[in-house]
Amino acid sequence: GSKYLARYLNAVSAASAPRLEEDRLPENLEARAFFRALAAAWSDAATLAAAAQNMPKDSEIMDEHMIPYGLADILVTALTKHGAHLGASKALLRCFAQLTAFWFDRQFMDMPEEDGDVGLRVDAIIAAGAAQPVRKATKAHNTNADV
């Protein structure tokens, strides 16, 4: 599981879309729907931006049903692929901000206050190589990562 979705989306980028293997998706319905929406929107930046805005905000879903399924790698790949598109960049940077938000920031982003394992999510984002694409997108659009 953990890298399946990232490999799948890379394959979508490289060629015609392979069939998404349903048994390799998380059991949580919100996470499953989010990953399906990202996959369906993968080739179009504007559609991807809209899909990214619907990332589940519950920390338990993030920790147990999204990060273990490679969400950090997927977001980094998406930002690398669509970073030149303002809407996609803002939506993806917002996903990173939501994933790394502690309880006191979560309330300002209209998220449940329970922050879960923020350290786990930050480590996954760093390990996925987010620093350079985030910096590049932020600089390209003269925006802050806390959009």
Image (cartoon, grey):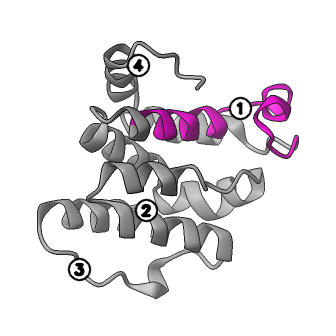
Where residue 22 appears, as percent x and y from the top left, is 46, 86
Nearer to me, 18 or 122: 18
Q: Which residue is mark 4?
A: 138
Left or right: residue 100 compared with residue 19: right
Under mark 3, the amino acid is Pro
Disc 2 versus disc 3: nearer the observer: 2
Left or right: residue 110 compared with residue 145: right
Residue at mark 4 to residue at mark 1: CA–CA distance: 18 Å
Badge 4 or badge 1: first in the primary sequence: 1
> In this view of the protein, can residue 17 be seen by the observer?
yes
Q: Residue at x 40, y 41 (%)?
A: 88
Rate crowding at label 2 as few (under 14), some (14 to 19) or many (20 or more) other CA atoms within 10 Å. Answer: many
> In this view of the protein, can residue 28 be seen by the observer?
no
Outermost left residue:
15
Q: Is residue 100 magenta?
A: yes
Q: Quadrant of the N terminus?
A: bottom left
Where residue 144 appears, as percent x and y from the top left, is 52, 16
- Residue 133 got which mark? none
Badge 3 or badge 1: first in the primary sequence: 3
Q: Which residue is mark 2?
A: 38
Badge 2 or badge 4: first in the primary sequence: 2
Q: Which residue is mark 1?
A: 101
Magenta region: 89-113
- The secondary structure type at the circle numbered 4 is helix
Q: Residue at x 29, y 68 (%)?
A: 8
Badge 2 or badge 3: first in the primary sequence: 3
- The secondary structure type at the circle numbered 3 is loop
Residue at mark 2 to residue at mark 4: CA–CA distance: 21 Å
- The secondary structure type at the circle numbered 1 is loop
